Image: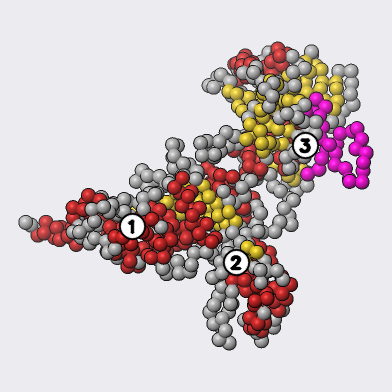
Amino acid sequence: MSDAERKRNQRAADRDIRLPPPADSERRRRCLDSVYLFHRAYFPEVFYQPFTDSRTQMIDAICAAAERSGDQAIAGPRGDGKSRSALFTAFWLAVRGSIGFPMVISKSGKRAVDELKNLKWAIRESDLFVSDFPEIGIPIREMGGWASRARQMTVHGEPIGMEWGQDCIILPTISTESLRENVRNWPENLDSCASGQIFASLGIEGPVRGYSVRNRRPDLALIDDIDDRESARSALQTESRIEIIDADVAGLGGPDRNVSRVFLCTLINRTCAAYVFTDPRQRPSFSGQRHKLIEKMPTNYALSEQYIAMRSGRDTEKDPDGREAHAWYVEHQAEIEKGHVSTNPYRYNSRPLSDGEPAEVSSYQGYLNFVADKGMVSALTELQNDPPPDPDGSLLILTPYHVRTNCRSNAKRGIVPSDTVALTTGADVQKLGCHHVTIAWNDLAVGSIVDYDFWPFETQGVKAAACELLILDGLQAWWHSRTEGFVDEDGETWDSDLAIIDSGWKQDGWNSQPVELFCRSVGFETAMPSKGIPNWRDKPPSRTSMVGPNFRVEWKLGFPLCEVNADHFKIRVHEGFLQEFGDSGSLGIFTPEADQWGREAANAHLSYAKHITNEQWAPKGTSGAYAWQPSNGGRFQKPNHWLDATALAIAAREIRGISVIENQSQDDDDYGDEPGIITV
């Protein structure tokens, strides 16, 4: 044997590990059957307090979500150990074989890496875990913190495929057969727990979409406190986080398998992502839980207010630690705390201060100290998960998230509500096809969007000058596809009372406008060509025109042309989505179909909502005049065809004589006959 071969064999022998049998097989089995025994036995430095009811509910909910491939959102008091409980529970689920690839998604990459670091350290330092699970623990300990050693390590001469990176670790892969063959006294009825489980950690803005390791995809996503104060105050940042969870995280499992999502959080305000996902009305599939530190306030809260006043009003130079108020609290503790219920009675600071007395004697005193030092708003938000309403909450910004999630009619697609009095359609025609929207209206002008879609024309690759007849054929094909119409709850069919179709685009060289020819073929009382007029000015009616509020129908050369105030009706679209559905003038979208797990498609209504919000009504330049502008700051125009189509459907409603009801004061009993505009 050459010297090189001898050295190579020696290095291989140095990398190879021989495993002993488990120290206590029975304890191992019991801990694999109970997450609580597992945590307390192997990680007592992490789980040193008794499991409270709220922590038990949280851990049970995580286990249930993981094992049934479901979702769960849990809001707990800040500092209550949510992240650690979730991460170590995911580790237990992986070790026992319930999951194989949990992923941590935090507000930042650094935060995610830090959480994974805590788990790595705890595994390596737990003597009891290493002795009971030698096939996992001993290779990790023998690695000595060197990630490069992990990749080269072997057990009984076989590579184990372990990795130990900052943002991803892969546990050893050692078969049960190998353990029974190579480990003396390995129990015959004990299977290996080392199956190459993967743990990854990413920030919410990281490469979440399509994430995979060794061609494996995550099966559990732990979404850990992704809000911060900056993002919670930004509608755009909040919406971005929500879309990542709805689309990218939901799609982590691949096209044929759902990934379980567990959202752990503390609420910051009533618009943050945490509030959305823990609200059963907005995200029913997440079965949201909001845990309070103080579940029930004491019967005599006046004493609590007296203590808060004593602590907050102290002389901070003479009594920086509030010892005078503390002494009074200890003297009256039983009376102050009578009747209260704390979900975590162990959550207080018992460290002795300068007078030898503990800083706090109960979790309720800790809560009152938080109120006195940081204010009631912070306490309600961070400890009670009940943030007060934002004083500027009425200044709602229309975002794609709001349109697609909060503006629902609670009807299914194509179903006309029972109180419908008219059905109108708006359509925006381009070379490649027609974006159309159909809305059912009741007599209060509440609009239920029963359908929207894109109908493609056979014009791909054809020069626009040669598309005249192709567009006409496409419009007729679209219209005939609607011959079955829509159905109401009694099974009766409906069709549009009036369709308004944009005819503003006409190519030079065409003999006629395809939209006008199409409308003539189906009847102008059913479909009417239209054109948006900038810088709208009212005109008096004439022998050849009909004039209404923000529209007029002009008869020219035998064709009626509906001229509309485009700015006005697009504003009505935005106002309609900003109102609570059911109010006069409000708009709601049909509910998308759910899959077998009760989930909507991750991108449900997303394209439509982006069209609606790709423009905003805002001041232009320094003049102060308002105009419709790209919502991306004017850099480029994104598609807005469904916005135009929805605006035309509202114009058709006005032509049919259905207007919103004007707001009146409660003292005004005479609502009059004239339609008005509701103010949002």
Q: Find out whether the residues at labels 1 and 3 contact each other: C-beta distance under 8 Å.
A: no
Looking at the image, residue 600 sits to the left or right of residue 257; the answer is right
Q: Looking at the image, is mark 2 or mark 3 earlier in the sequence?
A: 2
Instruction: Return the mark for residue 29.
Output: 1
Assign the C terminus to one quadrant of the image: top right
Residue 169 locus on image (x, y percent): 36, 55
Disc 3: which residue:
585
Looking at the image, residue 214 sits to the left or right of residue 222; the answer is left
Q: Secondary structure at mark 2?
A: strand
Dot 3 alpha-carbon crowd within 10 angstroms: few under 14, some 14 to 19, many 20 or more: many
Q: Secondary structure at mark 1?
A: helix
Magenta region: which residues?
651-680
The answer to whether residue 267 of the structure is visible from this angle is yes
Dot 1 alpha-carbon crowd within 10 angstroms: few under 14, some 14 to 19, many 20 or more: some
Tell me the kind of residue under disc 3.
Gly
Q: Is residue 659 magenta?
A: yes
Which residue is found at the position 52% from the left and 64% from the top? 52
Instruction: Return the mark for residue 342.
Output: 2
Q: Using the image as rendered, state which of residue 333 and residue 236 is in the foreground.
A: 333
Q: Looking at the image, is mark 1 or mark 3 earlier in the sequence?
A: 1
Q: Looking at the image, is mark 1 or mark 2 earlier in the sequence?
A: 1
Which residue is found at the position 66% from the left and 43% from the top? 406
Residue 277 locus on image (x, y percent): 58, 49
Chief secondary structure of the magenta portion: loop
Pick out the residue farthest to the left. 1
Mark closer to the observer (2, 3): 2
Which residue is found at the position 89% from the left and 24% from the top? 541
